[in-house]
Image (cartoon, rainbow, N blue to C red):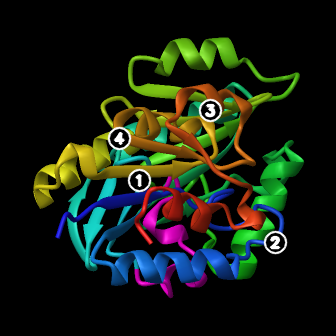
Amino acid sequence: MNQSIIFFDIDGTLITEETYIIPNSTIEAIKKVQANGHLAFINTGRPISEIDDCIKELNFDGYVCGCGTYINLEDKELFYKSIGPSLSKKLAFKLRHYNIDAILEGKNGIYYDHDDNIASKEVIRIKKRHIKVGFYKGKTFDDENIDFDKLVIWTNETSNFDAFYEEFKSSFDFIHRGEGFYELVPLGFSKASGIEFLINHLNIPFENTYAIGDSTNDLPMLQYVKNSIAMGNSHPKLFDLVSYVTKDIEDDGIAHALKHYGLI
């Protein structure tokens, strides 16, 4: 059989960002694609500590998490790299110094600043959800053993983003996700680096690689694979840069794409 490997983003691709629900058509499509002998992998900016139960229940063949900083196959860890305690502590200090809100994300946990120091309503909203679903265990920027893998930041009118960027641009790729919103990934790592690692490990032909996403942080994986798919609800920047644009997430977009390519 000509086995293919398909990489799925989570937010806005597998689950709706408003309800955090996976459409039934998506669940059935992933079951079918695996039953047809293909490999289905998560490829997300989230750390492995931040995967919803509804995602785990789909029994993916493996995960690329933290934008390539963590990789597993059939529940076996193949690769992991954190940024280390020294740089983690420096970042936590400098984020406060430059008045920048952040969520520090890692395999072993998520770190938030104290509520009194957080200006962003979006960070507070996400923190409340992380507490509700059990992702957040209470670790703060002051944790003496702080060590994470990547981070997301939000700036405001009091932030000194330019100074922060100059200080850390040699260590991180700054992915612009929206107004005042950036995802910071250690240089040399991306959703694409995770794919490269896995297809070499599994000896999958490049022609049989697929990726489905909706956001600007999906661009590395979409531009790396042979067959790139943007959800209909994607950031408009993706539409001219992919092989195929499918329907919206809630309009059976995943199933539509997999049928288009004959995978189901």
Q: CA distance from mark 3 to mark 1?
A: 33 Å
Which residue in the structure is indicated by mark 2? 19
- In this rendering, the answer to whether 15 lies above or below 218 is below
Give the side of residue 23 with respect to residue 28, left or right: right
- Asked whether 101 or 28 is in front, the reply is 28
Q: CA distance from mark 3 to mark 4?
A: 14 Å
- In this rendering, the answer to whether 73 lies above or below 28 is above
Q: How would you rate the neighbour count of disc 2 (Cα within 10 Å): few for under 14, some for 14-19, many for 20 or more? A: few
Q: CA distance from mark 4 to mark 1?
A: 31 Å
For image coordinates 49% across by 55% down, the residue present is 44
For image coordinates 32% across by 75% down, the residue present is 61
Q: Which mark is residue 225?
A: 4
Give the structural element (helix, strand or loop) at label 4: loop
For image coordinates 49% across by 36% down, the residue present is 243
Residue 167, given in percent of the width and then of the height, sits at 50, 16
Q: Which mark is residue 250?
A: none
Amino acid on which disc 1 is placed? Asp
Q: Quadrant of the C terminus?
A: bottom left
Residue 176, given in percent of the width and then of the height, sits at 64, 28
Looking at the rendering, the stretch of residues picked out in magenta corresponds to 44-59
- Asked whether 114 or 21 is in front, the reply is 21
Q: CA distance from mark 3 to mark 2?
A: 23 Å
Q: How would you rate the neighbour count of disc 3 (Cα within 10 Å): few for under 14, some for 14-19, many for 20 or more? A: many
Which residue in the structure is indicated by mark 1? 147
Q: CA distance from mark 1 to mark 2?
A: 31 Å
Residue 14, given in percent of the width and then of the height, sits at 61, 66
Which residue in the structure is indicated by mark 3? 238
